Image (cartoon, rainbow, N blue to C red):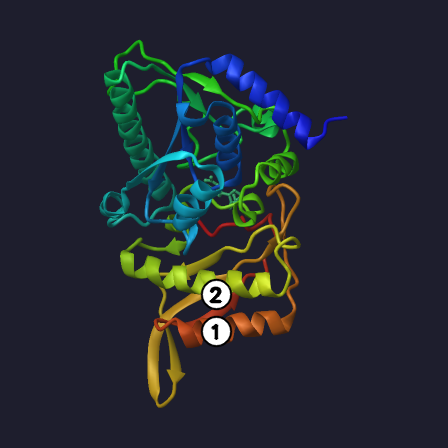
Amino acid sequence: TWTTESIVDEQVEAIRRQVGSKRAICGLSGGVDSAVAAALVHKAIGTQLTCVYVDHGLMRKGETEQVEKDFVAATGVQLKVVDASERFLSALAGATDPEQKRKIIGREFIRVFEQAQAELVAEAGAAGEDVAFLVQGTLYPDVVESGGGTGAANIKSHHNVGGLPEDLEFELVEPLRQLFKDEVRMVGQELGLPEEIVQRQPFPGPGLGIRIIGEVTRERLDLLREADVIAREELTAAGLDREIWQCPVVLLGDVRSVGVQGDGRTYGHPVVLRPVSSEDAMTADWSRLPYDVLARISTRITNEVSGVNRVALDITSKPPGTIEWE
Ligand code: XMP
């Protein structure tokens, strides 16, 4: 008979006991779990916590601002933002294979995060303080499956910090270890986090990097971001957010299709809508979205995103298709 309030109180107590007067670091991914973990730890130890957000430039429109502005405004947490988008783009140049992209993004992510971490440890050290803890948003299902997450945001099994003294290890703080996703959302709500963060649908760590088929370029990212935000706006306006597990929008970067607009012929990229319903992402079915919602998304994308002249709908279940295209 847990109430959300009692979970919060209990965890705040436990975190205070664990961390004492030392300092902690938490990486924010933009997702629900790390946000709630950070908010909980911040409630417990306040300014002893510093959060790090690596902006890899592969987020959707508005998501980085959500972390930088809304999350900080809601919690008052100290946040270090590292803008590494140039670095990720150059590292991704020429990469087209999905697993290669994941590897590159994961590798760069760890490097940038560790560097930021090392800087924070050094700064604290200069001030005579000891950073001894790393906060992780590990959930109960992650514990059970041991290694639930994959990709760039997964730094879960990563305790040892490169570039620092060999013997320096962080002790983990994992306040969500006993919770399921819906409980985590309730805790987030209790802590006053913005709705857009607490109710956020799953989004892969490698971000839009694996939603562009072909090479990831700045231009393609911009196109996809515009198309994606239109789809999200219309799905939200239609009240479908809770019904849909997630709806990737995929840019076929290496495909061009002929179209006609006004008096002119266009030669642009198609995007694919991939709305799915699912319980746990292990299996999924394609969502039977109302035709009028699909029509609005299609009309708006082709009108408002110059460079995209065709919208396709993915009607494949999982299996055999995965949710993402890469
Ligand atoms: P698939 O495409 O395998 O996706 O059906 C299942 C769920 O996992 C997400 N996904 C990822 N998450 N890093 C992540 O953190 C990844 O590399 C990755 N690939 C897929 C996907 O969005 C879906 O929720």
Q: Image point 41% across, 73% down: which residue?
A: 304
- Closer to the camera, 61 or 217? 61
Which amino acid, by three-letter code, is at mark 2?
Ile
x and y percent of residue 237 in the render? Answer: 59, 65
Identify the amino acid type marked 1.
Answer: Arg
Instruction: Report which residue position mark 1 lands on.
Output: 300
Q: Residue at x 52, y 70 (%)?
A: 297
From the viewer's perspective, is residue 142 above or below residue 214?
above
Residue 56: percent from the left, percent from the top?
33, 44
Residue wearing tag 2: 230
Q: Name the residue located 52 percent from the left edge and 60 percent from the top edge.
A: 232
Q: Is residue 162 visible?
A: no
Q: Is residue 143 left or right of residue 208?
A: right
Label 1: element kind: helix
Dot 1 surroundings within 10 Å: few (below 14), some, or many (20 or more)? some
Relative image position of residue 14 (x, y in whole percent) = 57, 17
Q: Is residue 265 above or below residue 232?
A: below
User: Which mark, by number, is residue 216?
Assistant: none
Q: Quadrant of the N terminus?
A: top right
